[in-house]
Image (tube, rainbow, N blue to C red):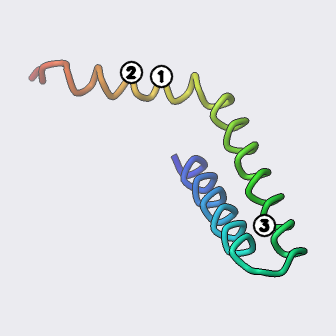
Amino acid sequence: MQFVRRILILIVVLLDAGALLWSLHDESLWKYGTGLLASAGLASLVLAVAAKSTASNFIAGLQIALSEPIRH
Protein backbone atom coordinates (compact mmCIF):
# COMPACT_ATOMS: atom_id res chain seq x y z
CA MET A 1 0.00 0.00 0.00
CA GLN A 2 2.94 2.36 0.56
CA PHE A 3 3.93 1.94 -3.09
CA VAL A 4 0.44 2.83 -4.31
CA ARG A 5 0.35 5.82 -1.96
CA ARG A 6 3.69 7.12 -3.26
CA ILE A 7 2.61 6.69 -6.87
CA LEU A 8 -0.64 8.57 -6.22
CA ILE A 9 1.25 11.39 -4.50
CA LEU A 10 3.64 11.60 -7.46
CA ILE A 11 0.76 11.79 -9.93
CA VAL A 12 -0.97 14.53 -7.91
CA VAL A 13 2.26 16.55 -7.70
CA LEU A 14 2.82 16.21 -11.46
CA LEU A 15 -0.74 17.28 -12.20
CA ASP A 16 -0.44 20.27 -9.86
CA ALA A 17 2.87 21.36 -11.41
CA GLY A 18 1.43 21.00 -14.91
CA ALA A 19 -1.68 22.98 -14.00
CA LEU A 20 0.46 25.70 -12.43
CA LEU A 21 2.65 26.01 -15.54
CA TRP A 22 -0.44 25.84 -17.76
CA SER A 23 -2.11 28.73 -15.94
CA LEU A 24 0.78 31.13 -16.58
CA HIS A 25 0.64 33.43 -19.60
CA ASP A 26 4.15 32.72 -20.92
CA GLU A 27 3.91 30.59 -24.06
CA SER A 28 7.02 28.49 -23.36
CA LEU A 29 5.86 27.70 -19.81
CA TRP A 30 2.41 26.86 -21.17
CA LYS A 31 3.98 24.29 -23.52
CA TYR A 32 5.89 22.71 -20.60
CA GLY A 33 2.69 22.57 -18.57
CA THR A 34 0.84 20.91 -21.43
CA GLY A 35 3.59 18.32 -21.83
CA LEU A 36 3.65 17.65 -18.09
CA LEU A 37 -0.11 17.16 -17.95
CA ALA A 38 -0.02 14.84 -20.96
CA SER A 39 2.80 12.72 -19.50
CA ALA A 40 1.03 12.48 -16.13
CA GLY A 41 -2.15 11.33 -17.84
CA LEU A 42 -0.27 8.73 -19.86
CA ALA A 43 1.59 7.51 -16.77
CA SER A 44 -1.66 7.11 -14.84
CA LEU A 45 -3.15 5.04 -17.69
CA VAL A 46 -0.11 2.77 -17.75
CA LEU A 47 -0.22 2.32 -13.97
CA ALA A 48 -3.96 1.62 -14.05
CA VAL A 49 -3.48 -1.14 -16.61
CA ALA A 50 -0.54 -2.60 -14.67
CA ALA A 51 -2.35 -2.54 -11.32
CA LYS A 52 -5.70 -3.82 -12.59
CA SER A 53 -5.34 -7.40 -11.33
CA THR A 54 -3.80 -6.32 -8.02
CA ALA A 55 -6.57 -3.82 -7.36
CA SER A 56 -9.29 -6.30 -8.28
CA ASN A 57 -7.79 -8.93 -5.95
CA PHE A 58 -7.56 -6.38 -3.15
CA ILE A 59 -11.19 -5.30 -3.59
CA ALA A 60 -12.33 -8.93 -3.76
CA GLY A 61 -10.48 -9.67 -0.51
CA LEU A 62 -12.11 -6.71 1.19
CA GLN A 63 -15.51 -7.79 -0.05
CA ILE A 64 -15.02 -11.32 1.31
CA ALA A 65 -13.68 -10.02 4.61
CA LEU A 66 -16.59 -7.65 5.12
CA SER A 67 -19.35 -10.03 4.01
CA GLU A 68 -18.21 -13.15 5.92
CA PRO A 69 -19.77 -13.55 9.34
CA ILE A 70 -17.30 -13.37 12.20
CA ARG A 71 -16.60 -16.83 13.61
CA HIS A 72 -15.29 -17.50 17.10
Is 40 on the left or on the right of 53, as rendered? right
- Vertically, is 4 above or below 51? below
- Vertically, is 39 above or below 15? above
Q: Which residue is mark 1?
A: 57
Residue 37 pos. (x, y %): 73, 57
Is 6 on the left or on the right of 39, as rendered? left
Camera-side residue of 14 and 63: 14
Residue 10 picture quarter: bottom right
Do tag 2 and tag 1 residues touch (Cβ < 8 Å)? Answer: yes
Residue 63 pos. (x, y %): 30, 23
Q: Earlier in the sequence, mark 2 or mark 3?
A: 3
Kind of residue indicated by mark 3:
Gly
Residue 62 picture quarter: top left
- Mark pair 2, 1: CA separation: 5 Å
Quarter of the picture containing the C terminus is top left
Residue in the image at 84% along x and 75% along y: 29
Residue in the image at 69% along x and 63% along y: 14
Residue 50 picture quarter: top right
Q: Which residue is mark 3?
A: 33
Camera-side residue of 68 and 14: 14
Q: Which residue is mark 2?
A: 60
Few, some or many C-alpha atoms within 10 Å of disc 1 (few <14, some 14-19, many ≥20)? few
- Mark pair 3, 1: CA separation: 36 Å
Camera-side residue of 67 and 31: 31
Kind of residue indicated by mark 1:
Asn
Q: Given this view, does label 2 or label 3 mark the residue nearer the observer?
A: 3
Residue 69 pos. (x, y %): 12, 19
Q: How many marks?
A: 3
